[in-house]
Amino acid sequence: MNVKIPQISESEWEVMRVLWSKSSPATAQEVIDQLASPNNWSPRTVKTLLNRLLKKNAITFTKEGKMYYYSPVVTEEECCRMERRSFLQRIYNGSLAPMIIHFLKEEKLTKDEIEELKQILDNKAQDAP
């Protein structure tokens, strides 16, 4: 299935995380219960976010009686991939090396992280043309 990955806002990401973490569809109330308190959101805000995600085709729903059950249409990995590509294009003009160099210079890494990066780069070097 070839699904267009929608761009979602920070708040919509919070809703999606709840839906991705559930093994089965979630009711609006279950999403509200998980998000209202930590984010200080009203139930209406959560319902608005669910409706936005429906319009973006990021989620779907089934209706059983008076209950609506929401499920993600797109996976977390698909959304993360799209966000990485969007970020890379917007900030680094699509070029990966300057971004990696910037992060490596600016961020503190553990020895284990450095070793993991070396291993990834060694593997990439073997596959390079």
Image (tube, rainbow, N blue to C red):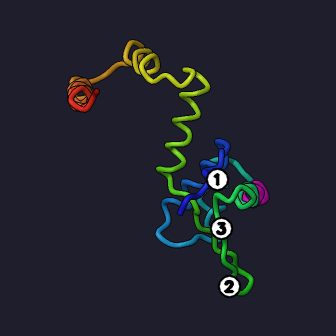
Q: Are marks 2 and 1 in contact (CB under 8 Å)?
A: no
The earlier-in-sequence mark between 3 and 1 is 1
Give the magenta range: 42-48
Quarter of the figure that contains the C terminus: top left
| In magenta segment, residue 15 | no
Q: Secondary structure at mark 3?
A: strand
**What is the crowding at mark 2: few (fewer than 14 residues within 10 Å), some, or many (at least 20)?**
few
Gap in angstroms between the C-alphas marked 3 and 1: 24 Å
Q: CA distance from mark 2 to mark 3?
A: 14 Å
Q: Which residue is mark 1?
A: 37
- Mark 3 lies on residue: 60
Name the residue rendered at 59%, 70% in the picture. Answer: 26
- In this rendering, is residue 56 above or below 9? below
User: Closer to the camera: disc 2 or disc 1?
Assistant: 2
Kindly indicate whether the residue at mark 1 contacts the one at mark 3 (C-beta within 8 angstroms).
Answer: no
State which mark lies toward you, 2 or 3: 3
Mark 2 to mark 1 CA distance (whole Å): 27 Å
Residue 110 quadrant:
top left
The answer to which image quadrant residue 123 occupies is top left
Label 1 element class: helix
Q: Is 64 drawn above or below residue 41 in the view shown?
A: below
Residue ranking furthest to the bottom = 65
